[in-house]
Image: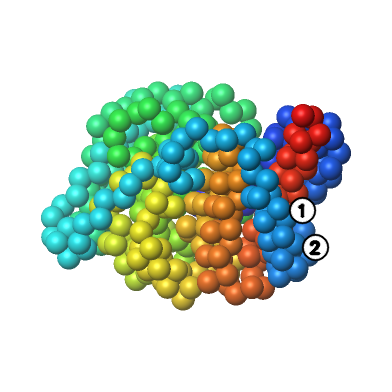
Amino acid sequence: MTWRMTLVRKGISVVLRAASRLCLAASLATVGCQVRDLVGNPGGDRSPATAFAAAGKCFDHVTQASTTVAPHSASGDGRAKAGQGTVVHDSIASSASRTRAVSVIVLADEAFQYDHAWKSIVTRDLQFLSDAFSRTANVVFNAIGWRTWDSGRIRSADIQAMYDLAVSDSRDVQGDVVLALSGRELPRPGDGWYADFGAAAYFGRVALVRIGPDGAATNYRREIELHEFAHLFGAWHSASPTSVMRIHPDHDPVYDFDPVASAVIRRFRDREFRAGGETLSDDDIDFITMQFRSSRVSGEMHPIANALGRVAIALWRAGDAIEGMKELQRARRLCVDVEGEGGPNVAYFSNLLLRACAFVKGQTQSDAHGR
């Protein structure tokens, strides 16, 4: 599945928890319990409106005192500092009339390479994906590099851990996108095929698939590859059982996109994959919001809010907490547009902002006392 809401929550929580350990003792005493509560209960027990009102007051205090927080060194806004990039904006009508060739770097672990013909198997898979995407948006995929991938550095079968490793190992590789393949034996699926066997971020660059080259698994592997590659173009999950973007397959594989997924893929078929979804234009975000509002699976987070959560993680890691909170505010507003003030993802971002503000407020007070 995608880099889901739960993955973003875990990532931000881990960063906040790690940052708390680096603060002065006074700061830890002030907000440590709140950070621990965030890890154990991301949603908190406040209503979205109450939590956001409290967060707003705290955020005002923090931004006014932001000179006591370590300044950022890069210029531009938070998105630029997160190392994102720009998106290619071609007209949809003109660009769809030509074929876009997307270059693919293939990472395969030793467990996937046990079949000596694994490269031929993956080449056929990419041709299958090309046929599907050509029908929708005139996009094809070509492998331009093959690398052995040491997925064994992650001992657990946790999908997030393996996905994070694939992303880390792909930062410096050439090519538009990366297909990371693992044939390691996995435990029995607990949350549907995609939850255990595939991962990709909305508007990301890396797709992870964890089904080996065994011929009996070919149909399922191709369905998951098609599903994850669609996420790279921004497509989200569908409630339709006949769409490849369904969350929980429970019958024979399907390879067709639902109408909304097709529209999203066509809209962003020429995107620059190294640029995150948070760099899209206002018109593009409005398009996503309109389509997502009418077609989302219950509980799923707005794709751009999801991307902004990842930016917030990067900013927190870089020590720029203020800009990170600004990205969280943007994410919350997008969730409100889709869910209204009472939505679960609105509540999540409201409570996260409250805890983040309290954390920074405690940090600035500690810094002031230390001078």
The answer to whether 347 appears left or right of 199 in the picture is right
Q: Where is the C terminus found, in terms of image quarters?
A: top right
Q: Residues within 10 Å of mark 1 (few under 14, many from 20)?
A: some
The numbered mark at residue 4 is none
Front residue of 315 and 58: 58
Which residue is located at x 58 percent, y 62 percent? 332
Whole-percent x, y for residue 89 in the image: 25, 55
Q: What element carries label 1?
A: loop
Give the residue at x 54% y 35%.
Answer: 72
Q: Which residue is drawn at 67% across and 56% down?
A: 60
Q: Can you give x and y, in whole percent of width and height, for residue 336 in the image?
A: 57, 70
Query: Three-letter amino acid code at disc 1?
Result: Asn
Relative to residue 9, is residue 70 depicted above or below? above
Please tell me whether mark 2 sits on a helix, a strand or a loop: loop
Give residue 242's position: percent from left, percent from top.
41, 68
Q: Where is residue 100 in the image (x, y as percent from the top left)?
A: 19, 49
Position of 239 relative to 117 (above/below): below
Name which quarter of the figure residue 11 lies in: top right
Q: Mark 2 points at which residue?
A: 45
User: Do callouts 1 and 2 mark residues in contact (Cβ within 8 Å)?
Assistant: yes
At x 54%, y 59%, the residue is 330
Residue identifier under label 1: 41
Of 215 and 203, the residue lying toward us: 203
> What's the distance in space between the residues labelled 1 and 2, CA to CA?
9 Å
**What type is the residue that disc 2 sits on?**
Asp
